[in-house]
Image (spheres, rainbow, N blue to C red):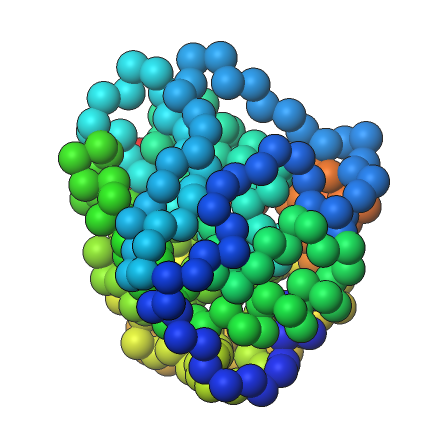
């Protein structure tokens, strides 16, 4: 999916006041229906969960957040960067899963200015109509705004970020952009590829400048992310003396954590999540 994001388009003015998405809807994106039998649903017992509004340049973007009812304002934070399908039910459920573990988990809708991908019926439409028009700069600043929103509500000194597919690529970029992040987890995000005015750099381009330890979680059978690109990223990280690591699950495909899709690999997903939680704890986000 990430490998399809190639269009060269003029940069979007992300300070404009026109926001296409103004609220977080329940349910799955139309492009992923029907969902599989393995789909996980996490309840809200013991949680505060639902939509909030994040002030950003030009207005507000919606976000889904979940946290323990009695968590107070000292909870560690996990920013969740959504996959190509936006903040649909799977991403909302991931927020609830992290909240059950004691985190303040929040997933802002980073496409809010460009379009509602949940209503589009094909990946190609999502890429062409929304993803290609969403500038990386806008995304990084909206994540900054999300962190700012959490000031006084959670402990942003204990800040982690994780993301999937499209969001996995963004995690690498954000780890270079915001040195206040303590630890990051990038799930099967594209590492190399073409650039354009909206997407001027790829993770490989910023790897030598990373100040944040990133755990990359990748599938050995991912048709869109060649193993050669993973090895290239590993070499650059090693040469830079960066503590980031990449784990490859040899039998896993792209989207192996997406329990609602045929690509779901429960063994790889469980192991990767355990490794990521240990990574967060190692770097003080727990």
- Number of numbered discs: 0
* Residue 96 vertical position relative to residue 224 in the rendered view, above or below: above
Residue at 72% across, 32% down: 39
In terms of image quadrants, where is residue 285? top left
* Residue 262 vertical position relative to residue 178 in the rendered view, above or below: above
Is 178 or 128 nearer to us in this picture?
Answer: 128
**Percent position of residue 86, x then y:** 58, 51
**In the drawing, does residue 177 fall left or right of residue 223?**
left
* Residue 53 vertical position relative to residue 188 in the rendered view, above or below: above
Residue at 58% across, 87% down: 8
Is 66 or 58 nearer to us in this picture?
Answer: 58
**In the drawing, does residue 174 fall left or right of residue 94?**
left
Q: Quarter of the image containing the N terminus? A: bottom right
Q: For residue 38, say whether it is visible.
A: yes
Residue at 29% across, 61% down: 57
Q: In the image as oriented, which residue stretches furthest toward the front?
A: 18
Q: In the image as oriented, which residue stretches furthest toward the left?
A: 152
**Percent position of residue 69, x then y:** 34, 16
Q: For residue 212, say whether it is visible.
A: no
**Percent position of residue 163, x then y:** 50, 52
Q: Quarter of the image containing the C terminus? A: top left
Is 170 or 22 nearer to us in this picture?
Answer: 22
**In the drawing, does residue 141 fall left or right of residue 34?**
left
């Amino acid at each position: 999916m990430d490998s399809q994001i190639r269009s060269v388009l003029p940069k979007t003015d992300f300070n404009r006041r026109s926001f296409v998405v103004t609220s977080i809807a329940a349910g799955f994106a139309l492009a992923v229906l029907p969902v599989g039998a393995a789909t996980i649903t996490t309840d809200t017992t013991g949680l505060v969960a639902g939509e909030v509004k994040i002030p950003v340049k030009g207005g507000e973007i919606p976000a889904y957040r979940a946290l323990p009812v009695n968590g107070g304002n000292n909870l560690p934070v996990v920013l969740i960067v959504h996959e190509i399908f936006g903040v649909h039910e799977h991403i909302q459920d991931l927020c609830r899963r992290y909240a059950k573990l004691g985190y303040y988990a929040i997933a802002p809708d980073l496409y809010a200015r460009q379009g509602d991908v949940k209503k589009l019926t094909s990946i190609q439409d999502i890429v062409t109509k929304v993803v290609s028009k969403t500038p990386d700069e806008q995304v990084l600043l909206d994540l900054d705004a999300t962190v700012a929103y959490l000031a006084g509500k959670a402990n942003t000194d204990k800040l982690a970020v994780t993301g999937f597919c499209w969001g996995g690529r963004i995690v690498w970029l954000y780890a270079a952009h915001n040195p206040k992040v303590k630890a990051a987890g990038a799930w099967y995000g594209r590492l190399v590829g073409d650039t354009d005015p909206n997407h001027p750099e790829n993770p490989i381009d910023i790897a030598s400048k990373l100040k944040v330890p990133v755990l990359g979680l990748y599938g050995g059978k991912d048709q869109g992310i060649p193993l050669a690109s993973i090895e290239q990223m590993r070499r650059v990280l090693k040469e830079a003396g960066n503590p980031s690591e990449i784990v490859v699950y040899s039998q896993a495909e792209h989207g192996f954590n997406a329990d609602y899709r045929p690509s779901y690999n429960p063994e790889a997903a469980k192991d990767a999540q355990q490794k990521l939680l240990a990574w967060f704890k190692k770097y003080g986000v727990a």
